[in-house]
Image (cartoon, rainbow, N blue to C red):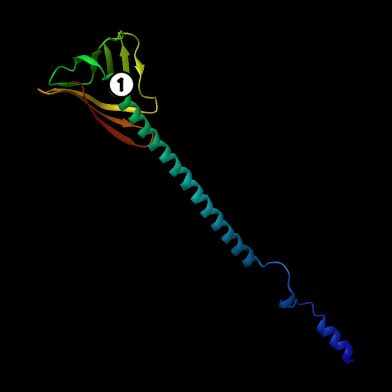
Amino acid sequence: GIEDWERVSTQSPIPNPQFRSGLTLVETIIYTAIVAIVVGGFLFVMISMIISADRVSDDLLLAEEKQFIIQKLDNILQSVSVVNAPAQGSSGMTLSVNKLNYDGNPVVVDLVSGAMRVTRGGGMAAPITPAAITVSDLLFEHAVTIKEVRIRTTALLTGPRGTTSIDFTRIIK
């Protein structure tokens, strides 16, 4: 009778939405999309940080090389007795000086194939700049006034991702 009818009607093969388990296809797609967006955003941030760190590293390399070249030129221009090149009142791409009480005269700084080099006493040229840095537009100006002798050095340094310029003046006398 009625009890059999109630038992049959409560044991329906249609699942009750209140008691379902698992995810529907739509929910799975939505959750997968959310996870993909989060992972993609995380990867984008990480790649941006790596690229930014590389740029900072390249900028730091250029700054360090610029400072090293200026220090090297300052050292070369200490205790100079004679400026062989460029001539007084002119400019050129080669600097040649004789230093007081120095066995390695002349000291020559030049530019060959994008590398700044120094030669002492006619010996082998040694690069001042690393292979990762290219130097261009190197110019030495030899200015003489009544009071002083000045050597001004200008150049452009180019690294893997940037450039910087050198503008350095040293008063000799």
User: Can residue 110 be seen?
Assistant: no
Q: Nearer the viewer, residue 37 or 97?
A: 97
**Measured from the top left, where is residue 90 in percent x and y?**
14, 21
Residue 75 lies, in percent from the top left, at 30, 21
**In the picture provided, is 14 more to the left or to the right than 135?**
right
Residue 116 vs residue 172, the one in the foreground: 172
Q: Quadrant of residue 122?
A: top left
* Occupied quadrant, residue 28: bottom right
Q: Is residue 102 above or below residue 42?
A: above
Q: Amino acid at mark 1?
A: Asn
Across and down, in percent, residue 121 comes to 30, 8
Q: Is residue 4 visible?
A: yes
Residue found at the very far bottom of the displayed protein: 2
What residue is shown with label 1?
A: 75
Q: Nearer the viewer, residue 30 or 159?
A: 159
- Give SS at disc 1: helix
Look at the image and tell me in which quarter the C terminus lies: top left
**Residue 107 position (above or below residue 149):** above
**Residue at image location 22% in from the left, 21% down from the top:** 93
Seen as rendered, the residue at the extreme left is 146
At horizontal 86% and vertical 85% (from top left) the residue drawn is 7
Residue 32 lies, with reference to residue 51, above or below; the image says below
Disc 1 residue crowd, few under 14, some 14–19, many 20+, Cα 10 Å: few
Q: Is residue 18 left or right of residue 5?
A: left
